[in-house]
Amino acid sequence: MTEIEDRLRDAYTAATSTVRPEALRPLTAPPARRARSLWAIPVAVAAAVALIVTGAVLLGSEEQKYRTDPAAAAGAPAYAVALVDKGEDKPYRAVVLSTATGRQVATIAGAYLQASVAAAGDRRTFFLTSRVGDCATRIYRVRIRGDGSVTSPEALPGAPIPADGGEGHGLAASPDGRRVAFGGDCGDLGRLVVVDTETGRQQVWTSQTGDPADRGVKQPTWAPDGRTVGFRYHAPPNGELRLLDTDHAPTGDLLTESRVLRSQDMTKDLRNGHFEDGQIESFIFNPDGSLTAIVQRTNHSSGDDQFGLIRLTAAGVPTGHADWLPSSALVFYLRVDPSGEHFLGGEGGRIARVDNGRFSWLHRPSEPYYYDVAW
Amino acid sequence: MSVLTGRSADPPEPADPTEDLTALFRDHHAGLVRLALLMVGDRPTAEDVVQDAFTALHRRMPRLGPDVRLLPYVRASVLNGCRMVLRRRKLASRFRPEPEPAVWSAEAAVLLSEDRREVFAALRTLPRRQREALALRYFLELSEAETAEVMGVSRGTVKSTTSRALAALAKKLGGTP
């Protein structure tokens, strides 16, 4: 336990020490409803109908506003693979989603523990992970057919990967699908593992720098050259975007062999009169070698925050302003399609999409809690 | 599995939802008021938020599915109530200055040493999501999975949010995160 954690617990305990159960107000039952006069019933019914209609219209208009525009979505992959979180520590279910309707069109066999999903560039090959033991993760490949049906999962050859899933969203496939990169951790070690999908050969890089609870390698992404892997790493006091040349870097210490592309901090670029600071939450390589990042900016006094997408050069320099997302959108991970014009991302169970700069929700809010998705 | 205690049980008859609610209130009322107090800063408002959460839960119980876990549900409801209080205060403060909530004001100096008030002053500068994650993790001592369930985010986000919050506190207060 650290000094800050100690001070936090001590302050919390002291500030709440006056709250004693016997001194609290008892729970007050809601007042009983009075008998209504006969004329009040039609009025109440009319008011209720008006409220329902108004609510439905407002809700409907909000949903309508962020419905996918077919013109903007033209050219996007027809299918995505998503993981359904069933709560607590239960394994995820993997499903195929139609990106036109947001509906599940197939279920992938198996259960996937602490899983991630990634797509290759052919729009039909997908990879899934599942934790099979301590510091042991197995990768599976599936292929989606033209009608949305899916092949049985096939385990990649070789031993399981010597890492756990860490924060999740930890899998990326090279554009040609011949290699996958898995970012995670193993105890106090951060790990990045690259696997040849045909032979099962593994390359492992390890890091033990920074906060032991936060050494995991986060959200790897493959560059279009098929050999460079980008990832986030938290090396206190800064979070960094890093690049690793997997063809030339000797396996071993991750931070020695990789290089810093830029800091996650983007305060200078994102602050304005209302928001005081900003940072990169996630980034991916576009097919042309540039980057797209999710950024979040914050007002510390009000606690307001906002998420947006921004394009960066290959050197990590912003090329323009961020496109800010609706306030209801929390986006902490990002997936790009092979064209570079269509993005999926999300958080809190709902998948968002951005097609040619236009934001929409992939599915209705009442549907399952989707943890990860790829196309 | 009991929604209240987390212990396995195989009751021969379906549980009475009112009994569940009563037990939930008995076991967790004070803890929830303390959580709300940390969020909104004054006790009467904290008690109101928790009362409202239980009243709403009582009203909704007949419509809740059998799989709904009441404790995470009411915790999320309390956090949501706190967010609404803070939003209302923010709106009101545009027209008239608000007095400082008691938890971190000079009124609490007897209970809160200078050191503790420094901690609260630093906490107030964090984004709302970071403050919530810290209170759930270090006051209620919830696991990452439990915190994620209450906040409606992933476990990974809880981990990174907490880590960033601790790093920000260490920067403001000095010390190791």
Image: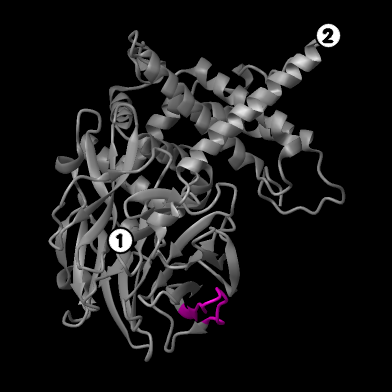
Q: Is residue A139 positioned above or below A216 on the image?
A: below
Label tally: 2
Do tags 1 and 2 sit on the same chain? Answer: yes
Gap in angstroms between the C-alphas marked 1 and 2: 67 Å
Q: Check disc 2 and give the amino acid type.
A: Ser
Residue A142 painted magenta: yes
Which region is colored magenta? A139-153
Q: Position of residue A239 (x, y in %)?
A: 23, 53
The residue identified by callout 2 is A37
Q: Position of residue B163 (x, y in %)?
A: 33, 48
Q: Main secondary structure of the magenta part?
A: loop
Which chain does the residue under circle 2 lie in? A
Secondary structure beneath label 1: loop
Name which quarter of the figure residue B87 lies in: top left
Residue at (36%, 40%) from the top-left corner?
A6
**Frontmost residue, B2 versus A90:** A90
Residue at (33%, 37%) from the top-left corner?
A305
The residue identified by callout 1 is A215
Q: Is residue A133 positioned above or below B43 on the image?
A: below
**Frontmost residue, A14 versus A56:** A56
**Frontmost residue, A45 versus B148:** A45
Considering only order in the chain, which callout, 2 or 1, is on the residue closer to the N terminus? Answer: 2
Residue lying farthest to the front in this orientation: A71
Residue at (55%, 38%) from the top-left corner?
A60
In the image: residue A250, left or right of residue A369: left
Q: Position of residue B176 (x, y in %)?
A: 25, 46
Residue A210 appears anywhere in the view: no
